[in-house]
Image (cartoon, rainbow, N blue to C red):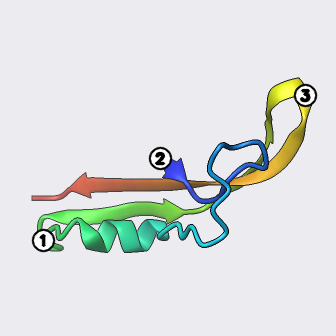
Amino acid sequence: MDHGSTAPWSWNQDPDARYPSPREVAAGLGLDPAAWTVERADAPRRTATGPGGRTAEVTDHVLIIRRTA
């Protein structure tokens, strides 16, 4: 799991930051599709709580890859 967005209270507020999608991350691994299967690659959103109780909707990336061979 990794981040798919930046929370407003994050130290890194680079407006040009780009978060690759879970599918892009999987493709970048260069795994042999004959030996590996992407079981899950999605970007669920959730409400996170930061300093002082401030809340914001953020995106998490979930990537599950299973060895098939």
Tell me where residue 2 appears, x and y as whole percent.
49, 49
Q: Which quadrant of the view contains residue 27?
A: bottom left
Q: Report how far apart the C-alphas of labels 2 and 3 lie in the structure.
A: 24 Å
Q: Secondary structure at mark 2?
A: loop
Q: Secondary structure at mark 1?
A: loop
**Kind of residue at badge 2:** Met
Q: Nearer the viewer, residue 34 or 63?
A: 63
**Kind of residue at badge 3:** Gly
Category of crowding for the residue at label 1, using alpha-carbon neighbours closer than 10 angstroms: few (below 14), some (14–19), many (at least 20): few
Q: Residue at x 27, y 54 (%)?
A: 66
Q: Earlier in the sequence, mark 1 or mark 3?
A: 1
Task: Give the residue at mark 2.
Answer: 1
Q: Earlier in the sequence, mark 1 or mark 2?
A: 2
Q: Which quadrant of the view contains residue 22?
A: bottom left
Q: Report how far apart the C-alphas of labels 1 and 3 lie in the structure.
A: 44 Å
**Kind of residue at badge 1:** Asp
Category of crowding for the residue at label 2, using alpha-carbon neighbours closer than 10 angstroms: few (below 14), some (14–19), many (at least 20): few
Task: Give the residue at mark 3.
Answer: 53
Task: Give the residue at mark 1.
Answer: 32
Q: Report how far apart the C-alphas of labels 1 and 2 lie in the structure.
A: 21 Å
